[in-house]
Image: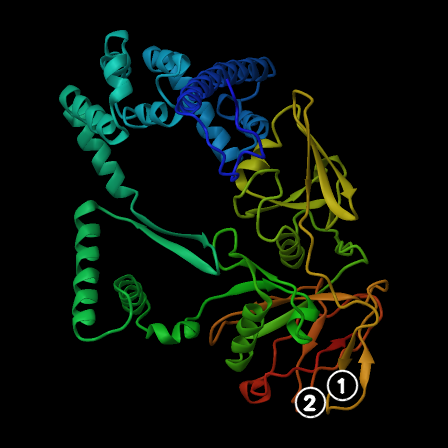
Amino acid sequence: MILPGATDIGSGAVVSGAVQAEWVDLLGELEAVKNAITATQARITVALDEATRAEEARQSIRAERRGRGVPNQVGGALRVSPHAGAGFVSTSRVWVTQMPHTFAALQSGVLSQWRATLLVQETSHLSLEHRALIDEEICGPAHLAELARMGTRRLVARIKELAARLDVHACVKRNAKAVSERRVSVRPAPDLMVYLTALVPMAQGVQAYAQLKAHADAAKAGGDERGAGQIMADTLIERVTTRDPGHANDVPVTINLLVSDDTLLAGGSQPAVVVEGAPAGAGVVPAPVARNLAAHAIETDAAWLRSIYVNPRGRLLATTSTSRFHPQGLASLLRAREQGICATTWCDAPVRHADHVTPYAEGGLTSLDNGQGLCARCNHAKQAPGWSQKTAQLGGRHAVETVTPTGHTYVSVAPEPPAPVRAGVTAPVRGGGSNRAAPDPTATSAWTPAVGMTGPAPGRTPRSRYSIGCHTTPAHGAIAYRPSPPPRQPRPTHRLPGRARARSRRADLSWTHPS
């Protein structure tokens, strides 16, 4: 068989029909092998889970706590998040122990992982007996040929038909449970957008969509130049927020923007990071967008600054506390360092817990170096027997080395923070006079401000002993940078002054130190 090489792609070379047919056959064979590999992974996963639970039972660990670290081990091995690892563990257990025909079809390559997962999901409300009947009816040896020709939607419809025939009461209870789980969620999308999703009963969802569609069609008929999708989105936001979509920036929300001083104050081009404001933040945003966000917040008297000191390699300077738990200011720094995302390798969940790398009970300090931001699942998993962690440095950045009960090692490294202004870069002085040199990053006065923005009347600003206070004054020229000594017992963060002082959108930032 002739396999395509790197030079064959895009070369326009003539390939015979026989070779193309061989390529199609190879694609199908590789897909079957991939499915068989998934079945082998599932069997190994179940064996690992059972062995771990048995070992923890011998250690007299409570039943509800056994196997908590297995999803993280499986996720690390498969290079997916612990949440995805937990899903694979539970699904694999059903394949291996309750649905032998589905597992055999997966092992033979006839059934894909996704379709095998749907068989588990769509029978989760049934008894073991009824699940076994559906397993044999769809994936039994006599039905494999039909299964291979069946589309995914037809497969789901067939499963639901059999389930309703076998146990209609279980299906009714499942529908009632689904209604009780209605919710609204938001997740980041590219280009500083978000997906706003509502999980509601079908009749209500269809009705809401139909009304939005009818309103969009009427607006288009009246000469509105926006697209139908744009009108529907604008109408939804207008009805939910009771505000004109054109004034969406006036909606009172709070976000945390991690941005370098160069980008915020000197027209730099380095992107910023939205740390909070949505689950796991909104990711990286371009420098002009970050400046616009900050400028609008200043105009509405709704912004404050916290300066974060970094060393020449971008590592946040150490801070400590005598408290057992991380104080609010230190926890905010941990979230900022992790940019709002769990520090565990391959985990994309938002930070929920401020955790000690070396446990407090084992002498670990409540400090920035010994701290990490984790999601709830990862924080609980590391407490299982056999797990250990220690801090390290990689490329000058904070890192955590995790060793699992099987001896496998994973290293997670904190993202690189926005770089401060470098030596030799000058910034204009207020009043348009001569320039001053910007802070030298080799000194501890190099800083990266974290800008907090909220809507009108945000309430009291969080106070933190780990922040350096910044304030604005009326400025009719450009920004003046003022290097300062290393932070020693800094004062809490101060709010920016009133609207009248902020209208110029130019700020003279200076450090406030204890007198």
Between 1 and 69, which is closer to the camera in this rendering? 1
Mark 1 crowd level (few <14, some 14–19, many ≥20, 10 Å Cα): some
Q: Position of residue 218 (x, y in %)?
A: 16, 69
Given contact means CB atoms under 8 Å apart, are the residues at marks 1 and 2 in contact?
Answer: yes
Residue 477 seen in the current view: yes
Residue 227: name its quadrant: bottom left
Under circle 2, the secondary element is loop
Q: Which residue is mark 2?
A: 477
Residue at image coords 66%, 56%: 333
Residue 181's place in the image compared with 221, above or below, is above
Q: Earlier in the sequence, mark 1 or mark 2?
A: 1
Identify residue type, mark 2: Gly
Q: Is residue 62 left or right of residue 102?
A: right
Residue 36: name its quadrant: top left
Residue 190's place in the image compared with 476, above or below, is above
Mark 2 crowd level (few <14, some 14–19, many ≥20, 10 Å Cα): some
Residue 315: name its quadrant: bottom right
* Direction top: furthest residue: 141
Q: Position of residue 260 (x, y in %)?
A: 68, 66
Residue 134 seen in the current view: no
Q: How many angstroms separate mark 1 from mark 2 (CA)? A: 7 Å
Q: Which residue is mark 1?
A: 429
Quarter containing the C terminus: bottom right
Q: Is residue 54 left or right of residue 193?
A: right
Residue 120's place in the image compared with 465, above or below, is above
Identify residue type, mark 1: Val
Residue at image coords 69%, 56%: 417
Residue 427's place in the image compared with 192, above or below, is below
